[in-house]
């Protein structure tokens, strides 16, 4: 039986899975990533640690599996950038992480160009994306523009290191998050490269997400293994759920919530607060999606635990929420870092309304869980209206830590008036990268063939009328 090594290099850690052709996970490995905060608003990683953590997690997974993987699929934290010397493979300083805000002033200066940038890239002008990070690195760490200096997102850096400097490449999903890639022409934009002063020669080649990215050298994993799949984390999760048809959607419930809705071959032009981005089609080919971020999801529960001290663990919240027959009119708008999509009010702050003498901690807990479901429903409604596939959405596939809460998943189904589907293996991001590689290797025909062995828990709408009434209270 053939096997795929799936690597998920995330913001706080790297997960490695060995996945068999019948869908079983036969080996796991994990390594944490050190976070560096040199100044307020700055977030950095050590590029060498990103590589060694990925390599060591992979070695752990391979050792546990006791098999030799046939290929590698790689997914990564998006927008984070690394600069390095092509002759020595030594990083030019630290990696600037997607969360970093050091280029906020520069982004404000770009306001007159925002509409043009959005038309070319599908993105809003924000320090979140890579272009101003690369511009900053060039100005502050490589001002002489040495021809040996190259740059890339984390996938490019890992491919470079795994192939021992043979391949400098990325895929369209990662390229589309840099603010340098034209998603209409599907190529690096000469105009945007000029705007940010980024020489095209520094940037990686853009290759198909499901295809060859060179060969990981034998010294890393005991044998040479072809790298056959690369995608950014949220697009990898979309593929891992087999959401590959216009209107199919997934939500990742983490610290925040990331929703993607596939739009097929049609490039979307979503409203404020949502992004157009590159995604993968049925066999990994380039397609499009609408993406939106809810800033606070699971972080609201963390705040109940760490800020208010009214729960000891997130695992308690399901039983506490079930203890109430309704929310009794108590709502929590968790705008603790502003409101993300679809409202996009960065200066908004958290609000709790409907308090009475009878309000207790259970109301706070339930309101925090309900907020995740309401926010998701609001974003999906906006996506459906703008995607051109308004009638195609028939279920929401989910992953992330909060999906273990059955009460929340049921309430989400009720609010949406549509099924919510939770897979038996929640490492969907890594699995999606593995699927892209496995499709290229001929292990699976396509994304649907890959997910066929998976078991899904399906939450069907059961109390939609009451949920609609509660949702109206939230919108008010």
Image (cartoon, grey):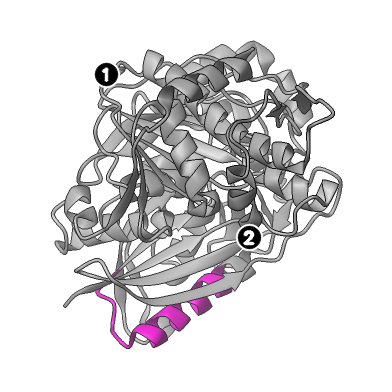
Horizontal and vertical percent for residue 470? Answer: 56, 22
**Residue 63 colored magenta?**
yes
Q: Residue at x 64, y 12 (%)?
A: 476
Residue 12: give its label.
Answer: 2
Task: Report the residue marked by disc 1.
Answer: 391
Q: Earlier in the sequence, mark 2 or mark 1?
A: 2
Q: Quadrant of the N terminus?
A: bottom left
Packing grade of label 1 (10 A; few <14, some 14-19, many >=20) is few
Horizontal and vertical percent for residue 162? Answer: 44, 70
Secondary structure predominantly adopted by residues drawn in magenta: helix
Relative to 64, say whether 113 is above or below: above
Relative to 88, say whether 196 is above or below: above
SS type, badge 2: loop
Q: Which residues are magenta?
A: 51-71
Horizontal and vertical percent for residue 68? Answer: 28, 83
Judged by depth in the image, the label closer to the viewer, 2 or 1, is 1
Q: Residue at x 72, y 55 (%)?
A: 44
**Residue 345 colored magenta?**
no
Q: Is residue 357 left or right of residue 433?
A: right
SS type, badge 1: loop
Q: CA distance from mark 2 to mark 1?
A: 37 Å
Nearest the camera: 455 or 243? 455
């Amino acid at each position: 039986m053939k096997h795929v090594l799936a690597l998920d290099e995330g913001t706080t850690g790297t997960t490695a899975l060995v996945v068999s052709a019948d869908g079983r996970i036969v080996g796991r490995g994990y390594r944490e990533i050190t976070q560096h905060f040199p100044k307020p608003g700055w977030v950095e990683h050590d590029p060498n640690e990103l590589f060694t953590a990925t390599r060591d997690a992979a070695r752990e997974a391979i050792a546990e599996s006791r098999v030799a993987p046939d290929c590698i699929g790689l997914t990564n934290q998006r927008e984070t950038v690394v600069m390095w010397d092509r002759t020595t493979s030594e990083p030019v300083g630290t990696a600037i992480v997607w969360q970093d805000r050091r280029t906020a002033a520069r982004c404000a200066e770009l306001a007159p160009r925002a509409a043009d940038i959005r038309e070319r890239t599908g993105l809003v002008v924000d320090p979140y994306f890579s272009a101003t990070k690369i511009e900053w690195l060039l100005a502050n760490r490589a001002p002489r523009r040495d021809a040996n200096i190259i740059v890339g997102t984390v996938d490019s850096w890992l491919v470079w290191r795994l192939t021992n400097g043979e391949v400098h490449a990325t895929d369209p999903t990662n390229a589309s998050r840099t603010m340098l890639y034209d998603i209409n022409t599907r190529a690096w934009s000469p105009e945007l490269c000029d705007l940010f002063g980024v020489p095209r020669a520094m940037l990686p080649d853009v290759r198909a997400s499901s295809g060859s990215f060179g060969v990981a050298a034998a010294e890393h994993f005991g044998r040479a293994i072809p790298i056959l799949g690369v995608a950014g984390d949220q697009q990898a999760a979309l593929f891992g759920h087999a959401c590959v048809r216009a209107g199919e959607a997934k939500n990742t419930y983490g610290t925040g919530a990331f929703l993607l809705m596939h739009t097929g071959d049609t490039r979307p032009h979503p409203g404020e607060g949502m992004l157009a981005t590159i995604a993968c089609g049925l066999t990994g080919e380039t397609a499009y999606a609408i993406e939106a971020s809810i800033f606070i999801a699971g972080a609201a529960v963390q705040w109940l635990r760490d800020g208010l001290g009214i729960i000891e663990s997130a695992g308690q919240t399901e039983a506490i929420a079930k203890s109430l027959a309704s929310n009794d009119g108590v709502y929590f708008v968790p705008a603790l870092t502003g409101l993300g999509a679809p409202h996009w009010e960065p200066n908004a702050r958290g609000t709790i309304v409907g308090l009475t003498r009878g309000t207790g901690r259970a109301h706070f807990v339930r309101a925090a869980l309900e907020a995740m479901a309401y926010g998701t429903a609001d974003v999906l409604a906006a996506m459906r209206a703008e995607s051109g596939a308004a009638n195609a959405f028939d279920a929401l596939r989910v992953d992330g830590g909060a999906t273990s809460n059955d009460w929340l998943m049921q309430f989400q189904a009720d609010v949406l008036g549509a099924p919510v589907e939770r897979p038996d293996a929640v490492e969907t991001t890594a699995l999606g990268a593995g699927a892209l590689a496995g499709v290229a290797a001929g292990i699976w025909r396509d994304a649907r063939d890959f997910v066929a062995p998976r078991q899904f828990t399906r939450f069907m709408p059961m109390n939609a009328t009451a949920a609609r009434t509660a949702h109206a209270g939230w919108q008010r």
